[in-house]
Image: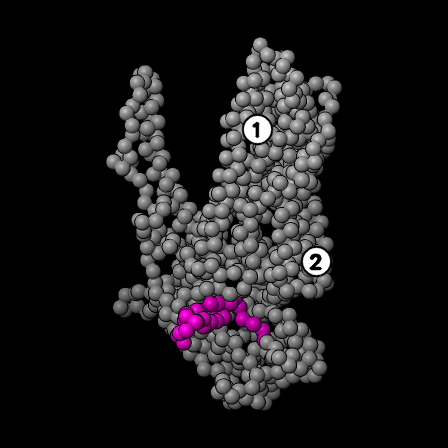
Amino acid sequence: MAPGVTPFRPAASRRLRGPPSSPRARAPAFPVIGPGAPRRPRTDGPGRTALSPGSDSVRPGAPLPLTSAAATRGSKMAVAMDWLLPQAIGLLSLVYGISSFYVPGVAPINFHQNDPVEIKAVKLTSSRTQLPYEYYSLPFCQPKTITYKAENLGEVLRGDRIVNTPFQVLMNSEKKCEVLCYQPRKPVVLTVEQSKLVAERINEDYYVHLIADNLPVATRLELYSDRDDDSKKKEKEVQFEHGYRLGFTDASTKIYLHNHLSFILYYHREDVEEDQEPNYRVVRFEVIPQSIRLEELKVDEKNSCTLPNAASSAPQEIDPTKENQLLFTYSVHWEESDIKWASRWDTYLTMSDVQIHWFSIINSVVVVFFLSGILSMIIIRTLRKDIANYNKEDDIEDTMEESGWKLVHGDVFRPPQYPMILSSLLGSGIQLFCMILIVIFVAMLGMLSPSSRGALMTTACFLFMFMGVFGGFSAGRLYRTLKGHRWKKGAFCTAMLYPGVVFGICFVLNCFIWGKHSSGAVPFPTMVALLCMWFGISLPLVYLGYYFGFRKQPYDNPVRTNQIPRQIPEQRWYMNRFVGILMAGILPFGAMFIELFFIFSAIWENQFYYLFGFLFLVFIILVVSCSQISIVMVYFQLCAEDYRWWWRNFLVSGGSAFYVLIYAIFYFVNKLDIVEFIPSLLYFGYTALMVLSFWLLTGTIGFYAAYMFVRKIYAAVKID
């Protein structure tokens, strides 16, 4: 089994598989280490051992007679192949290994004995409402001075509001039980409004997210499963949940609040010289939430408390119809661990569903080979025969009487309707393609690790702005090829059409989030900053690229366009545009839908997604499959003597976006427990943006592949 591969577990659960209770430090296989990276070198797996140049395992056949120049070229090619082969295999093994690669995004912090370890709150989240709230939106105990951390753009868009808390935690210092915000003989009193709010959040299944030394808190879950039906032995499985539950309800619908937190922090002792004070690093942060009734807690004058016996203690009930009195308490326990600091994210990132990703890759490769077989049959057999027949000079009249794609040579490059909108959409598609490719590649190398909160979204936003120069260039050149003249209006359309739709939908959704007072609402200064990035960075770069693209020589079409359009014969039912979308979209979607499941789980169920090595492979396979299916569809259309392929190919190539929409509806109905209007509106609003972006991406990939194919085949035939 490959490193990091564990049995498949449905990802609809919020749980993560963690290492056993006494983890062992494991040696990395690469110079840069991190969770999920291979732990020890292997030579028996596929792609794990690079071939050395000049290896005796490959014996070339007898050389053919060559001229001196050909021999020189052949020897150079052989040397190049001897060098490229091990490099390629090494690159594949690297991609294989970094499917869960992780490079820490921050430098480690060393603590000494009794140094303060600050506990900060991030937010409250729920997969049922999709509305995050800041920590102090509920009546938790507050410190004397509330300090919010300066956040990057990605953290703000995610709804993170990192703030300090009154928990006093010292490195390697135990605390059995301590009371927060306690005044002698005066417990915390929740008003009726506060009690209603807390009860509502508990019913909505909210989780509290804390961090210590930038490490998220996790709740340990120990699950027991029967190893054999006839055996009484049970195997313990340790899993972790992000954060901890705010509270729980029982069968009688009574509501209970987790008012006591037992923090369990693990530290790794660093090797130092004998005369130096030992250094400690935090490597895991766990919590055991408990609900303890006020009467069960015994508090002294020093804010210390005594916990009751867990078996006989009663939980702290929250009655939403009256005031409630309670105490917030916590305890701290430290344990030494062998886990090194660079591997401390294993608890959160070592998921049990890695094996299914390999099934996804294999499934995708099978789809690509299937499409390649169809293409080979078309290009090698049918297309080559067509070109040979069309190029027979002695049989031109018979050839012209036949039906086929050559008959529309005078109309195939006729500019379509609305060329400005088409070129603008394709320019935005190029902008998206460049942004996604760079983000996935950089994330695959581990430079956008989960410890750098918001780095992925911040990078994506800035890259989309800066990729406007490439989108403008491609749109401008295509617009000139389509006989367009108003380049300034075309550049404005490219810079405003797709981003304007995205901004409009996000603004409307943001108004609803504002109405719910959620931290997920983008603040007004952040919205102004995004508008400044749009009009100050993206718009000028699109104009710059469009100007140079419009001035550049247009694409050279191999045949001239007739002045009078050719009449299009009646098309069969399977050439209908919607049928084409259904046919063209199923195979690219089948190549990536398994990975889509995990992306949806990460977005809507607050999980970490980090397997960017797999995602990069799936993205490459998606590009290849979209290109292939687009070529097949445009060939069939031209054979039916329908030369209106520009818009149709763009729409049909993005047909997999239709299946993404269907899958999103299926995921909403079967995997999520969303019943309220605003969470449902948020889900389908953001899903609409995802589907639109995916359609632009795949449609652009398919369009340019088909355009190259059409130019290639018409350049290969003789036209009188």
Residue 47: quarter of image: top left
Q: Nearer the viewer, residue 191 or 83?
A: 83
Which residue in the protein does label 2 denote?
681
Q: Which mark is residue 708?
A: 1
Q: Magenta part of the protein: which range?
A: 218-247
Q: Quadrant of the C terminus?
A: top right
Please report the residue visible at 30 percent of the width from the left and 68 percent of the height from the top.
Answer: 276
Q: Which residue is at 28% across, 65% downward?
A: 273
172 relative to 576 in the view: left or right:
left
User: Residue at left 73%, top 29%?
Assistant: 570
Q: Is residue 603 visible?
A: yes
Q: At which x and y percent is residue 19?
A: 41, 65
Residue at the image position 69 percent from the left and 40 percent from the top:
578
> Helix, strand or loop at disc 1?
helix
Residue 513 in view here: no
Q: Which of pointers 2 and 1 lies earlier in the amino acid sequence?
A: 2
- Give the left or right position of residue 472, taking residue 232 as reference: right
Q: From mark 2 to mark 1, how far is it between C-alphas?
A: 41 Å
